[in-house]
Image: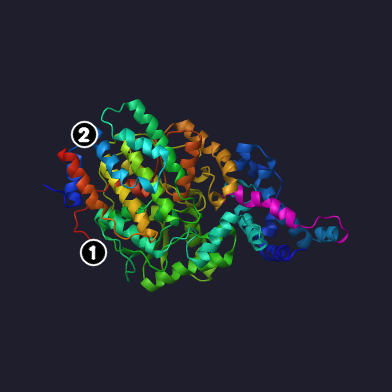
Amino acid sequence: MSASLEKGVRVLKEVIDAPIASYFSSCVHCGLCAEACLFYTETGDPKYTPIHKLEPMRRLYEQEYTVLGRLKKLIGLSKAVTDAELAEWQELVYNSCTLCGRCSVVCPVGNDIVYMVRKFREGMSASGNAPDGIKGAANRTITIGSPMGVKLPAVKAQMRHVEEDYGLPIPMDVEGAEYLVMLSSMEIMNFPEYLGAIAKIMHQAGKTWTLCSTAFEATNAGMQIGNSDLARVIVSRIVDAAEKLKVKTVISPECGHAYTALRWEGANLMGRSFGFKVRHIIEVLGEFQEQGLLKTEGFETDRLTFHDPCQLARRGGVIKQQRNLMNMVSKNFVEMPDAGFMNWCCGGGGGASAIEEGEELRLEAFKKKKSQLDTVKPDRLVTACANCRIVMEEGLEHYQMNLPVVGLTEMIADHIPNPVVAKPEGN
Amino acid sequence: MATTNDKEFRTKLATLSVSQQRQVAALFVQRVFALSNDARIKAALDMAKRADISDAELAVVSQAANTARVESYAQCGRDSDWTTQAGLFVAKAAVSCVGPEVEGENLAWDAAMQVRVARTCMAASGDVTDHKEAEAQYAILDNFLNT
């Protein structure tokens, strides 16, 4: 057994906890999870059945933690997990799983298969079997602080541009601000207008907010690769910043896993509760709408539909807010089949879009989104995740569907009248 | 009178016809084309400069420029390269040049802003800090209006 395999197996044994044991022993092999997974439905290949993606971990569980399994191992009737097997499983655990959670919610015995995949990724990562693309992102997170290597000068350059474009200040390191706004690299690099939208919305709502120079990046590569220690480090950077600046709420950007990592996993990773709230930007917009702080003008008249990011809707339970916001600015909002809690993934979440060799499979899986869109034939597609947005744009381009994709936060900001303010100093 | 700020710039752009907006927008993008060097972008700019472009021609170059834009996105988790990233915003600006007219929006303004982000990318890469792109755009517009 190689040193890396030994390490991976040791980590896997450690992560097989009571829930994992109960999930494996409860599985009734019904196959319902297969029908819930877009990688299975769009390829028809049974190897993409979610519970099958966990087979090496299941065998290890059986061999180590069940009487029958131990006996079988003793008399040589069970197969040990090998390096080659884990290497083969990389495609199943990373490329073809976006941690979308659809399999978990259809399981009749309540197995949280996403939880199991994430634990399996811990062993895969420890044994060196994570894909190079995600490894690179994790390494840059450790060394630079951002999975895409975005540094503070780049953020400041984008801030200057947005201040000039919108005529509103982008505050940084303001102690006592109500909101600490986090960004994802994807927004900084591809959609800097998101920052302008935030400035416009906060200005109208009369809320104080700030970015933080030591923690502007929310994307959690540790969650994606399966490394709890790294996930904890990333979360702790944000927690330290929020506590240093004494903010009341940290706003997660339009990035699915950033939200899950901070809102739902953060306190567990840190082993303590936070002295501030964590909210997704869509939740904050929903609160502003309820409090009458969002005053939009005019309506979109073309046919719009909304793609629910899995981490926001299914894993996070945020479903009503985005619909209320859509109806606030749209006269012709239509729902795709399965929209909301059971929406189908874009195919690129959970780190999958960082895996170059997974592109062909991703495009194959996108046929599910295509069929949803073909049913309602929208003029534009709205979403609230920068990664979903790019993955879908690529899919639409591949299938030659001329359908613009827009971010909900920016769409809301577009309907807020331009503020009349003096230009910030220094511009 | 020479344009000196964005308010005047925007007001003057609003007086242009859509065809004129395309032409002046193409001139803005031309200044940063070297950050992309994509043949599809060049084709879009060449078309946008023409006053007699047909809807069918626009549709073809718009589709190609849009493909170039989608191909230019930085993927989640991939290493950033701000020089390459500038190409995305050049492509976005080119798409504005040849894109359909949208009520309430000025495509030349949109293109001008994307061009400035492309320059910002160069600043983010540490190459250059001050391009005075806005001033250059004011001059291009004034020149366009005076000829």
Furthest residue to the right? A75
Magenta residues?
A74-100
Q: CA distance from mark 1 to mark 2?
A: 34 Å
Numbered circle sitting on residue B111: none
Q: Quadrant of the C terminus of chain A?
A: bottom left
Q: Is residue A122 above or below residue B72?
A: below
Q: Position of residue A125 (x, y in %)?
A: 63, 60
Q: For residue B140, say whether it is visible.
A: yes
Q: Position of residue A19 (x, y in %)?
A: 65, 60
Furthest residue to the bottom? A244
Q: Position of residue B53 (x, y in %)?
A: 30, 28
Q: Chain of mark 2?
A: B
Q: Chain of mark 1?
A: A
Q: Is residue A146 shown left or right of residue A229?
A: left
Q: Is residue A393 shown left or right of residue A222?
A: left
How would you rate the neighbour count of disc 2 (Cα within 10 Å): few for under 14, some for 14-19, many for 20 or more?
Answer: few
The residue labelled by disc 2 is B17
What amino acid is found at the position of numbered circle 2 in the picture?
Answer: Ser
Q: Secondary structure at mark 1?
A: loop
| Quadrant of residue A39 within the rendered picture | top right
